[in-house]
Amino acid sequence: MAKPPKSRATHNGRETNRSLSDQAYEGLEEMIVTLRLEPGAVLSETELSEQLGIGRTPIREALQRLAREGLVLILPRKGILVSEINPGKQLLLLEVRRELERLLARSGAQRATDEERERFTEIADGMERAERENDDLGFMRLDDALNKLIATAAHNEYANRAIGLTHGLSRRFWYVHYKEAADLPVAARLHAKLARAIAGGDSAAAATASDELVDYVEAFTRETVLT
């Protein structure tokens, strides 16, 4: 797992704490998505704090965020559990993702800054490397980076918040099933196509590429239901 970024030094303790919370979230989210914390696992704030080297308050804040995204369940007086994986619910999630991601892709192509467009191109290059090398973990990290960049580059805070609730569940579902039902090079190529369309400022192509990617993910999800 890549080390989370160091917190920024400020004179405001809340700024540092927020950065630590982000670090805790990123570390825990990747551990859940890649099944190092398996569905049904009981989590301990103390153990997670020791494992990540981050205080219990940022860990608690990260777990609350993960609960909002459906990756963990916080059960009063019972504990914290990693949520189970449900293919049927994943299909419902894709209905929401399709509409939001099309909007974000189209808006990102129109509104992205020059710096964001450069980053889209870098991610496309990385996706093409992952395709050539069949690099699953590299793909996962680039997928996460692309999701976040698309949400940011659209410059629509409401759509950003809404799509953020779907990312972790979608990435975990992919990680669980891709070896049996997915074609990683095809998925990487579709992600690269989307990133390049946004980088190029072509909103129609970006919307089409977004739909093609979700079509692929939906077909992959349905295949896991049937197998």
Image (tube, rainbow, N blue to C red):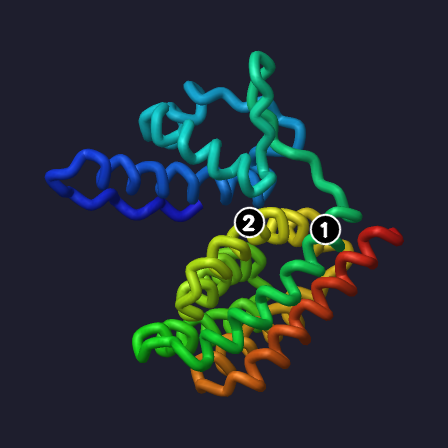
Label 1 amino acid? Answer: Gln
Q: Earlier in the sequence, mark 1 or mark 2?
A: 1
Q: Identify the residue at the far left of this view.
A: 11
Above or below residue 116? Residue 181 is: above
Depth check: 65 or 25 in front? 65
Q: Is residue 149 left or right of residue 132?
A: left
Q: Which mark is residue 90?
A: 1
Residue 11, percent from left and from top: 11, 39
Which quadrant of the view contains residue 68?
Answer: top right
Cα–Cα span, label 1 and label 2 = 12 Å
Residue 132, percent from left and from top: 57, 73
Depth check: 78 or 42 in front? 78
For disc 2, the neighbor class at 10 Å (few under 14, some 14 to 19, many from 20) is some
The answer to whether the residue labelled 1 contacts the one labelled 2, judged by CB atoms less than 8 Å apart, is no
Above or below residue 8? Residue 114 is: below
**For numbered disc 1, what is the local secondary structure?**
helix
Q: Is residue 171 left or right of residue 160?
A: right
Above or below residue 174? Residue 126 is: below
Q: Residue at x 41, y 64 (%)?
A: 152
Residue 34, percent from left and from top: 57, 44
Q: Identify the residue at the far right of this view.
A: 226
Q: Which mark is residue 220?
A: none
Q: Which mark is residue 165?
A: 2
Above or below residue 86? Residue 158 is: below
**For numbered disc 2, what is the local secondary structure?**
helix
Q: Which numbered mark, 1 or 2, is in the foreground of this view?
A: 2
Q: Residue at x 60, y 29 (%)?
A: 73
How many marks the image carries: the answer is 2
For the N terminus, the image quarter is: top left
Q: Residue at x 56, y 25 (%)?
A: 74
